[in-house]
Image (spheres, grey):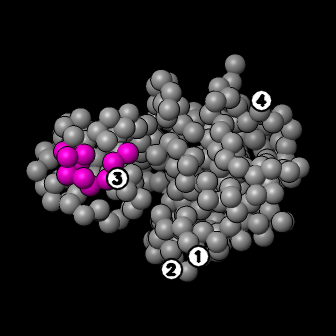
Amino acid sequence: MADLERIVPLGGGGGKTPLFCVHAVSGSAYSYAGLARSLDDRPVFGFEAPGFDNDRTPVSSLPELAREYVEVLREFRPDGPYLLLGWSLGGLVAFEMAKLLTAGGAEVGLLFLVDAGMPVVMDLPPERETLVRYVRDMAGTSDVSPPGLDELAEGWPPDADPEEVFEQVEAAGILPEEFDAYVLGEQYAVFRALLAGFYAIEVAGTHEGPSVHVLAERSPAEDMRWAPRLPALVEHTVPGSTHHSIWTGDALAELARLVREHLGD
């Protein structure tokens, strides 16, 4: 039986076709809460990863995740059309879902990617680098560390122990109080599994249906070349935004406007 707990309501309402948003590397759908508030006349749901807020073992195969999410989606909403949105790693999973849904005879009304990088197959970085990337992600940044993190990380060995690292991060006050060592440890396994899945996947095939990619202006566009995989692709860039700030302030307002425009609101 499908794990329907993977789908969480984010907001909105009314009788319009629901929008389903796929988590990024954190495994959480929380990043879409602001968008859901902006689409208050449309139901918005999020996919959360196995192991995030439950005792399931995290999944490190993105194609496997896509298959599970399609199964969950078809049980939750048996008939299309399906509207899919994914930020970052979530865009890649949404792309895999769109291919599976279409192959199964379902209609994908729109595939909407937000600053979604194309993966390159490689080994997972050393634990120290992965931990730095994780703490940055929890701080809501991508290429810039929060104050004190880089200095702290200089003392970590390449095979740093996550439990010890998170105790140091908590003691140094690098993250808000709610991200204590226990919370960081609980969520790191999901992050690490999903990151490994991103580095392991070799993207193949195409999705022929309507698709949109909204890029952050300060993200490297050369790492996000989706046109060969999405023949009907339309692209936009949000001025002044970064990979994470696209979900805040004026950037979020512009992103929400583009979502409404392409959904036909």
Disc with the residue nearer the chain's start (2 vs 4)? 4
Residue to which mark 3 is pinned: 176
Between discs 3 and 2, the one toward the N terminus = 3
Look at the numbered discs 2 and 1 and tell me whether their residues touch, using CB distance below 8 Å.
yes
Please tell me in which quadrant of the rendered image residue 236 appears.
bottom right
Mark 4 or mark 1: whose residue is earlier in sequence: 4
Give the foreground label among 2 and 1.
1
What is the crowding at mark 3: few (fewer than 14 residues within 10 Å), some, or many (at least 20)?
Answer: few
Q: Position of residue 105 (x, y in %)?
A: 84, 40
Q: CA distance from mark 4 to mark 3?
A: 38 Å
Q: Which residue is mark 1?
A: 250
Q: Is residue 66 left or right of residue 171?
A: right
Is label 2 in a helix, a strand or a loop? loop
**What segment is highlighted magenta in the picture?**
168-178
Label at residue 240? 2
Q: Can residue 70 be seen from the camera position used here?
A: yes
Q: Earlier in the sequence, mark 3 or mark 1?
A: 3
Residue at left 33%, top 48%?
A: 177
Q: Callout 3: helix, strand or loop?
A: loop
Horizontal side of residue 34 vs 164, given as left or right: right
Amino acid type at mark 4: Glu
